[in-house]
Image (cartoon, rainbow, N blue to C red):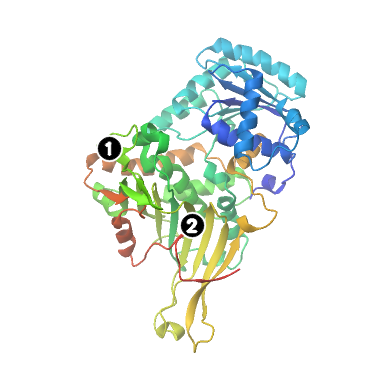
Amino acid sequence: MTEMNNQETMLAEGAIFYIFGATGDLARRKLFPAIYSLYREDKLGKNFAVVGLARRPRTQEQFREDVRAAIDEFCRYDVQQDEDWNEFAKHFEYKPLDINNVDGFRELQQHSQQLEHEFHIPGNRLFYLALAPELFGAVSYNLRDGGLLDTKGWSRLVIEKPFGYDLESAKQLNEELRSVFNEDQIYRIDHYLGKEMVQNIEVIRFANAFFEPLWNNKHIANVQISLSETVGVEERGGYYDQAGALRDMAQNHMLQMLTMIAMEPPSRLHPEDIRDEKVKVLRSLRTYESDEEVVGNVVRGQYSAGSLKGKDLPGYREEDKVNPESTTETYLGARVYVDNFRWAGVPFYIRTGKRLPVKTTEVVVEFKSIPSRVYLSSKHNLEPNLLVIRVNPMEGIYVRINGKKPGSEGGVQPLAMDFCQSSIVGINTPEAYERLIFDAARGDSTYFTRWDEVSEAWAFVDRIAQAWKNTSEDLHFYPAGSWGPERANELLAEDGFHWWPVNGQEEDTVVWK
């Protein structure tokens, strides 16, 4: 969407990429494969180095073998030949580091100067903190005190969610970071903003004359955002039992997707103007004034024992490291309103949950129906028109319309014109982390969250969390493998709507491709 993003062949500036937590799961699954993909697409050039940092002792050879194994398992590109790999691997270094020992950072500064000389890097440094949030402050202070920010080039800090546990903790964390870095140096990553079809929402909206005039409360009946997972908490029981779906998914991924759907056209194609419009959406969210309003508009659920695809599944309270009396939600459904001129009165329904039947992320825009007793609507039960944006795992768009049923005397049936980007031969869609690392290296902050976005999202979520502290009587249980609590269906039925089937569910629609 930005001018920089239009320059697909633009190289990232030469830099050292410091990966804190280099022996962790995120680095293995996402970061190392992303860096290799950027290298294969000639987006990094030759003037870069990657320094892996962790407490665990590793030799250079062991570290490079770990990186190779990660790329072989998770990268969308295969390593072509040994010469190619050796050229890439020589840019990787590993340094054991105690993040609480400033002397280690001073040694890292000396080593960094050697790498900059070796690879002709002009002093640019990107610090990626794949660490727990409570460590962000200590690392930032030691980066400063260890001299790593004393450079002729730029310094940027990339941090992962969760950014705090609530608004108060987020403020404290932000103050720690801002005592070292300026706001424009901090890149708060939400990997959903790096997904192809999430970024495509802006283009669909603002580059098509037959959508933008209809993108308002005069023509749209409701918007549905679904983010469903088939997995349970797996090995994250200890973390998840403290976070839950509200903090783990809604505060970041779901509200960010909502802002992309609801934002106004930016005045310029500039990162700050785009993020300004997203903040306006978050400030326009209708807050729940009482606990009763939270209960009436928000559904929290927890999966009990069930089955999926013939496999028996335990309940959430039976999972490892989960309190057997836990009231933590594994499902969240909500009715949200954006109280501005464009969207007043249009409900946004959001839902996310674990142990649901299908893994998918989709946005459904349901348009208002033709008035009853007018032309065909007086004789047929016409279905509303839909625009569906499929984000994950299938990427694509389809538009659902009504058309004549072939061979009938005026019969009408729903038709879907389907574009599946994932099915196009030759398309090898970049992973979200590739886009975001590339953008951070270029200084493009469009798809990173600014502090005011984070704070507004926490303010909205905290009201829900506070109401849930006061009672657990509204906790609804649903069998693992089902579509969540029945209350989530009732929420839409109260307004005369229903959840539309997502990709992978059966649907009585003829598809044009």
The kind of residue on which mark 1 rests is Ser
Residue beneath the point at 65% across and 31% down: 68
Among all residues in the image, which is located at the extreme bottom? 409
Disc 1 residue crowd, few under 14, some 14–19, many 20+, Cα 10 Å: few
Q: Which of 102 and 419 is in front in this view?
A: 419
User: Pointer 1: what residue?
Assistant: 326
Q: Which of 369 and 304 is in front in this view?
A: 304
Residue beneath the point at 48% across and 41% down: 453
| Whether residue 465 is situated above or below residue 218 in the rendered picture | above
Mark 1 element type: loop
Find residue 135 and name its label. Answer: none
The kind of residue on which mark 2 rests is Val
Point out residue 377 in the picture as x, y percentages from the top left corner. 43, 82
Mark 2 element type: strand
**Front position among marks 1 and 2:** 1
Q: Nearer the viewer, residue 250 or 272?
A: 250
User: Pointer 2: what residue?
Assistant: 363
Tag 1–tag 2 contact (CB < 8 Å): no
Residue 437 appears in the picture as rendered: no
Q: Distance between the residues labelled 1 and 2?
A: 31 Å
Point out residue 12 in the picture as x, y percentages from the top left corner. 71, 36
Point out residue 70 in the picture as x, y percentages from the top left corner. 60, 33
Q: Number of numbered discs present? A: 2
Tell whether 326 sits left or right of 402.
left
Residue beneath the point at 47% across and 84% down: 411
